Image (spheres, grey):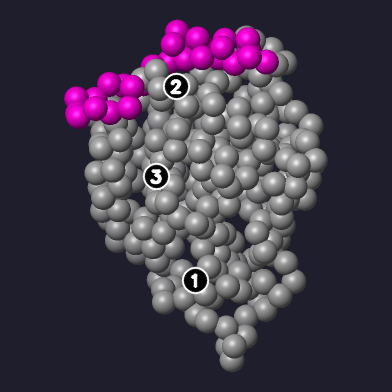
Amino acid sequence: MQKAISAVVMLFVVLGSLPVFAQASPPSEASRKAELVAAWKAASEAGVGGPKDVSLIDQATLKLAAGRFFVPQAEGARVLRALGNVVNDAGFVGLVVGTGPNDEWIVVIRYVKEGYIKDDDAKNWNADELLKNLKDGVEETNKDRIARGFPEMQVIGWVQPPSYDAGSHRLVWSLLAKDKGEADNAAKSINYNTYALGRDGYFSLNLLSNSERIAGDKAVAHELLGDLGYSAGKRYEDFSASTDSIAEYGLMALVGGVAAKKLGLFALVAAFVLKFAKVILIGLAVVGAGVLNFFRRKPRRDSADRSA
């Protein structure tokens, strides 16, 4: 296994490299690569593969299908940090990745418990105004990314304007983004967000992909959204006006300011994520079963327990 890990590290050196930025003492390229490999290894040991019912805190169950791998909170947060994300909210629940040879996506699962979200404003979407809020939010996030040695991101526009299903209480929207200064004809980051509203708050399932793959990858986001079911008593329709708290914002805010601040706009770093995801996948193909077990191993009993 150690030999396989070393091979993946070498592939990072040969096939992919982190950009270098002129700033005061950013983390070294070598240390970032080493941490990313270590983070994925820890994730593989802690996670669980499908088919499996995965408990999502005390709120819901995710029916994880075959070919999907769930990474729990601590190890998932480490992977995201290694990929340049800011993870500073206890609402983070875990990650889902695909184990297929062509899977190059990551889904970030978070839960925000801030009360029942009223959805009556879904009839009055103003996509232009919501887009402006998101652009303003990423400019704030960029300040931290610069300080940590990662590229700034730029929101371009919608891939899918906000769409809400009042029957299932599911919300979907998607953004197009890129590294600042990146060529216009380069593959663009895709932020494909899905939400499941519940009695006490909502789950966010945020798929990271790019413009060349989103046509197929978006089916994954809808699949996972459909496979998430709230527990009895936690469903949106279980809300009781006499006892339950109501969020201070409505559904529209999940696409605007609240999405930017509460969810951290994880997917706006998708371009950076995919630069490394591709190299990791090439590494898996080259070094064989030892590293494939990072994603396809049968979970240990303690790993299964940690994923619940």
Please tell me which residue is depicted at 80% across the width and 40% down the height of the picture: 301
How far apart are the alpha carbons under marks 3 and 2?
17 Å
Q: Which residue is mark 3?
A: 86
At 39% from the left edge and 62% from the top edge, which residue is drawn?
Answer: 258
Which structural element holds mark 3? loop
Quadrant of the image occupied by residue 263: bottom left
Please tell me whether residue 85 belongs to the stretch shown in magenta: no
Closer to us: mark 2 or mark 1? 2
Q: Which residue position holds label 1?
A: 114
Q: Position of residue 55 (x, y in %)?
A: 71, 55
Query: Which quadrant would residue 57 be assigned to in this image?
Result: bottom right
- Mark 3 / mark 1, whichever is N-terminal: 3
Residue 170 x %, y %: 58, 62
What residue is drawn where x is 77% and y is 50%?
53
Q: Which mark is residue 262?
A: none
Residue with the mark numbered 2: 33
Q: Which residues are magenta?
A: 1-28
Helix, strand, or loop for circle 1? loop
Give the left or right position of residue 296, taking residue 167 as reference.
Answer: right
Q: Amino acid at mark 3?
A: Val
Q: Nearer the viewer, residue 166 or 71?
A: 71
Find the distance from the CA under tag 3 to the CA under tag 1.
Answer: 21 Å
Does the magenta run of residues contain 23? yes
Q: Residue at x 31, y 32 (%)?
A: 150
> What is the three-letter code of the residue carrying label 1?
Glu
Looking at marks 3 and 2 on the same chain, the residue that comes earlier in the sequence is marked by 2
